[in-house]
Image (tube, grey):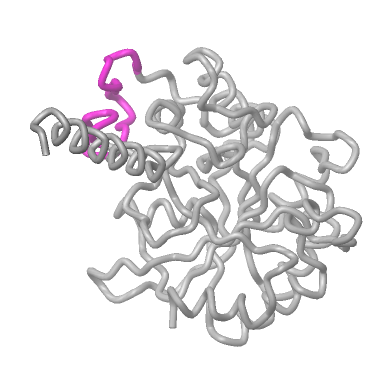
Amino acid sequence: MKASTLILVVGLILTAAFLLLAEREPAVRIAPAEAVLGLGGYAQPDQGGATASGDLVMQPDLMQPGPAGREVRTRHTFTPAPEGVRPYVPILMYHYVRYVDRAVDPLGFGLSVTPEQFDAQLAWLHSNGYETVAMADVARCIRGEGPCPARAVALTFDDGYLDAHTEALPRLGAYGATATFYIVSDFIGRPGYMGWEELRALRDAGMEIGAHSVNHPDLTRMHLDELRDQIGRSGAVLAAELGQPVVSFCYPLGRYNDTVMAVTREAGYLSATTTRADASQHDPFALPRLRISGDTSQARFEQMIRTYLP
């Protein structure tokens, strides 16, 4: 084989290998937090932070308590894990608690659990000694700022649908469970969504209210000023109306990148959740969740929890 032919063949092989690796590259790259802000992974209250390009500066904390000066409420005093042990906390992702005909609305079916499904899931968690905790507690545990529950599960609800109040809240109360509800601030009061009265009822029942942006955009496609508005203003509106800090954020559509993570830290949140599922909880601003849907049988639900907390 001629040398020129050999070089061509090798070049084609290397090109194919490069393209294969590129296809496997995740759509969203997660950099270590310290690479984004250079602060050991956490934005400190009185320090500035910058991305690699140096274009981020710490803004005033937008998550201050509202007029009533309430603390973030949590429902339980949970059983701590042994000293020096930080257990994994499965974070479950819900959207709707309602009845959906799969044949008519397959997408809605994938985002929904029936009231009976949700009741059975809560009953199993309760009878098997699992404790539900708010995302504020999960974040403090990960940051080493509070006790870590031994057998904790975090329940989260996205978007602020009305059935969170009519269907989820009564069942949570029946089992003494708590959850975090991520609210899109511009959707409050729209048909099918909770209004301020329902959100205050959640707050008063000991549920955590988190932010889910102003109007649910893809944050990875926004300019820096738009990002700060979407992430900061959504929490600030909720904090002012509910009279307590809003310290937990959820990325709309599960989409985020290094800049989105940095702006979320900058706004004063303690954590942010994604829609991906894996076993990594090293970064409180890229927390994975387990999707619970109409396809999640009771056996599958139990298996998911036992995978992380036998």
Residue at 27% from the left image edge and 28% from the top image edge: 37
Q: Nearer the viewer, residue 210 or 19?
A: 19
Residue 270 is left or right of residue 81, and the answer is: right
Residue at 79% from the left image edge and 60% from the top image edge: 97
Asked whether the viewer can see residue 145, the reply is no
Was residue 45 drawn as part of the magenta stretch in this picture? yes
* Magenta extent: 34-57
Residue at 67% from the left image edge and 75% from the top image edge: 122
Q: Nearer the viewer, residue 227 or 205?
A: 227
Residue 60 is left or right of residue 205, and the answer is: left
Q: Nearer the viewer, residue 288 or 103?
A: 103
Which residue reaches farthest front? Answer: 1
Judge whether 295 appears above or below 255 on screen: below
Judge whether 182 appears above or below 103 on screen: above
> Residue 129 appears at what percent x and percent y?
53, 83
Was residue 67 drawn as part of the magenta stretch in this picture? no
> Residue 134 appears at what percent x and percent y?
54, 57
Which quadrant holds the N terminus? Answer: top left
Asked whether the viewer can see residue 171, the reply is yes
Report the label total.
0
Q: Which quadrant of the figure has residue 293?
A: bottom right
Residue 152 is left or right of residue 93, and the answer is: left
Q: Which quadrant of the figure has residue 235?
A: top right
Main secondary structure found in the magenta portion: loop
Residue at 61% from the left image edge and 51% from the top image edge: 208
Which residue reaches farthest left? Answer: 3
Residue 115 is left or right of residue 306, and the answer is: right
Which quadrant holds the C terminus? Answer: bottom left
> Residue 148 appears at what percent x and percent y?
37, 65
> Residue 168 appears at what percent x and percent y?
77, 62
